[in-house]
Image (tube, helix red, strand yellow):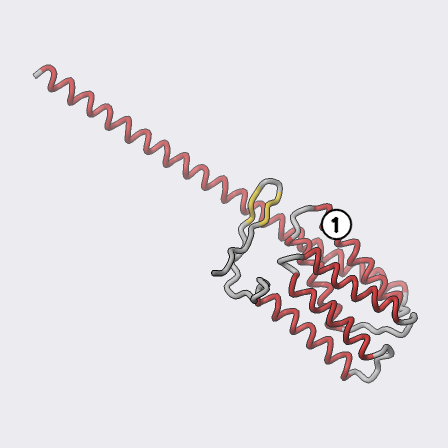
Amino acid sequence: MQAPTPALTVAGVRLPRLPDRSVTPAGLPMGDVVLAGTLAAVAQAHVWLDGTLDGSRPGLAVQSLLVTGAVAWRRRAPLGAIGIAAVGVLLDFIVYERGQSDLILGQLLAGVALAYSVAAHEPRRDLSVAALLVLLTSFWLGDYQRATPADEYLMSAVTVSGTWLVGRLALRERTQTARLRSAYEELDRQRARAEAAAAEGERARIARELHDVVATA
C-alpha cells in the first residue's frame, strides 16, 4: 500500500500536500522523476551534440547527471537534492581549469527548479536561506569556471534569488490558505456544537413541559 505523502508544518500550521497519484518504488513522485529525466536528456544532448563545448565531454556528462538527477528529490528531500547538485558543480570546479567548462542548459534549468523547490517545500526559513546561499555559490562557481563577464554573476544572483522568492511566496500562500481552512473548519465545528446544544436544550424543555402537563393532569 502506498504510504501517504507527509504534510508540511509551518509555524504550527499543517499544510496538506496534493496526493502523489504515482510514485516510484523509492517513494519519489513520478512527476519529479520524469522532470529529472527530461532535464538529464536535455543536458546529455547538449553535452554530446554541441560541437562548441570546451570541457571534457565524459566529465561534463557525469556532472550533468548529478545536477539534473537531483531534481527527482526536489520535493521529498529538497535540501539533499541541493547538496547533490552542489557536489556536481564542485566536481566541475575541482577537475577542470578555468575556462574549460561550459554552461549546460539542462543543468541551468535544474538549478532553477531546485531554487523554487527548496523555497516552496522546506518549511524552516533558516535552512531554506542556507540552501539559497549554497545555490548562489554553485552558480557563481560555474560563472567563475566559465570565465564569464561580471554581469553574469549578477544575472545568476537575480535568477536564483528571484526563483527562490517565488517559491517562498508560494509557501506563504499555502500557509495562509491552510490557516483560513483551519479557522473555517473550527467555526463549522463550533456551529455544529452550538446547534447540537440548542437541540438538546429544546428537547429538555419539551420534556419538562410534558412532565408538568402529566403531573397536573
Residue drawn at point x = 69 percent, y = 68 percent: 69
Q: Secondary structure at mark 1?
A: helix
Residue wearing tag 1: 129
Residue at x 65%, y 73% (from the top left corner): 37
The residue shown at (36%, 36%) is 192
Residue 112 falls in image quadrant: bottom right
Residue 207 position in % (x across, y down): 19, 24
User: To which quarter of the image does residue 41 belong?
Assistant: bottom right
Inspect the image, locate mark 1, and give the three-letter code of the amino acid beneath it: Val
Q: Quadrant of the C terminus?
A: top left
How many numbered marks have been drawn onto this rendered protein structure? 1
User: Hey, which residue is sitting farthest top in the picture?
Assistant: 216
Position of 77 compared to 135: left or right? left
Judged left or right of residue 20, residue 162 is right
User: Callout 1: few (<14), some (14-19), or many (20+) C-alpha neighbours within 10 Å?
Assistant: some
The answer to whether 113 is drawn above or below residue 12 in the figure is: below
Q: Is residue 97 above or below residue 199?
A: below
Where residue 77 sits in the image (x, y, percent)? Answer: 66, 57
Q: Is residue 52 above or below residue 211?
A: below
Q: Position of residue 201 (x, y in %)?
A: 28, 26
Q: Nearer the viewer, residue 217 or 4?
A: 4
- Residue occupying the point 47% across, 60% down: 1
